[in-house]
Amino acid sequence: MKTIRLALAALATFFVADMAHSAPFTFKARTQSLSATGGGKYKPVETKVTWEASKTAVVIVDMWDDHWCPNAAKRVAEMAKPMNELLRLAREKGLLIIHAPSSTVDFYKDTPARKRAKDAPTAKPPVSLSKDVRWGTNWCWPNKSREPDLPIDDTDMGCDCEEEYPIREAWTRQIDLIEIDAERDAITDNGQEAYNLLAQHGIDNVILMGVHLNMCVLGRPVGIRQMVTVGKNVVLMRDMTDTMYNPKKRPFVSHFAGTDLVVQHVEKFWCPSITSTALTGKAPFRFKSDPRK
């Protein structure tokens, strides 16, 4: 009898944990909508959205261990700790975590998380994935029929340091402040592998975060343009991102105001944005060097 009671208790615990594991979560998603009376101006609109945790993935783009631009590297390190806590909470809720440190996945070649991505059954996307390799990897360039030019000038590659630094691949892996769960997470920078993982897990919803929004978060084969194009429900986590923008270039605003402009561009032409509050219940992350109130 005691054995039966213990078995029933264990079974009850399993079902309660499973229900929590797949529970839905609700958040506010922000878009930019054309004002009917504003003469072509946009205004922010927030909508309450509910997603099933078991059908949702988080994709972390290019949170590398170093960068050729020292200020960019410092901001990644500052953002990594709160992002890691966010990912811990996301796992507890049952979200799939996909780490995408582009061009460094070979560092993880023998890890369970990397094998998990490579071993996912091949799935056919509804449209062809990007095949443009002008940057040495598949890249989703701006769709001129969908979006205009970015609102910032990043033609100098966007480093906001006072000194000039040579552009180089300074990264070797994802920053180690972000933990990778060997039992559950996956690692890939490949669009097909990412799509395979989403299909395998029945993922309809994707949360994008990482760096840099005007470049990799939009353009990588696991990024916003690709995920929207293959039909996923996509949101950008706007307080867990950064841009490569130099205030000495157009439109001559602060680095953080420049990031906000790119977030608004995404909200206008690609997908809504949310903040980390959606998963943490706490105030959004803010860089210490952002002087704005």
Image (spheres, grey):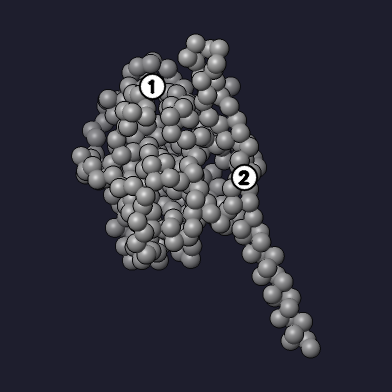
Q: How many marks?
A: 2
Horizontal arrangement in the rendering, residue 53 relative to residue 230 (left or right): right
Query: Residue 97 versus residue 127: which sits nearer the camera?
Result: 127
Which quadrant does the C terminus fall into? Answer: top right
Query: Residue 67 versus residue 110: which sits nearer the camera?
Result: 110
- Label at residue 132: none
Q: Quadrant of residue 248?
A: top left
Horizontal arrangement in the rendering, residue 249 relative to residue 44 (left or right): left
Q: Is residue 190 visible?
A: yes
Q: Which residue matches tag 1?
A: 151
Residue at the image point whose x is 43% and y is 29% from the top: 269
Q: Earlier in the sequence, mark 2 or mark 1?
A: 2
Q: Which residue matches tag 2?
A: 50
Residue at the image point whose x is 57% and y is 35% from the top: 29
On screen, residue 216 above or below 4: above
Label 1: how many Cα within 10 Å (few below 14, some 14–19, many 20+): some
Query: Residue 98 versus residue 64: which sits nearer the camera?
Result: 98
Residue 119 at x, y = what percent?
36, 66
Q: Please, what is the three-letter code of the amino acid marked with disc 2? A: Thr
Q: Please, what is the three-letter code of the amino acid marked with disc 1? A: Pro
Residue 77 at x, y = what percent?
44, 41
Which quadrant does the N terminus fall into? Answer: bottom right
Horizontal arrangement in the rendering, residue 229 relative to residue 277 (left or right): left
Residue 184 at x, y = what percent?
49, 62
Residue at the image point whose x is 34% and y is 62% from the top: 122
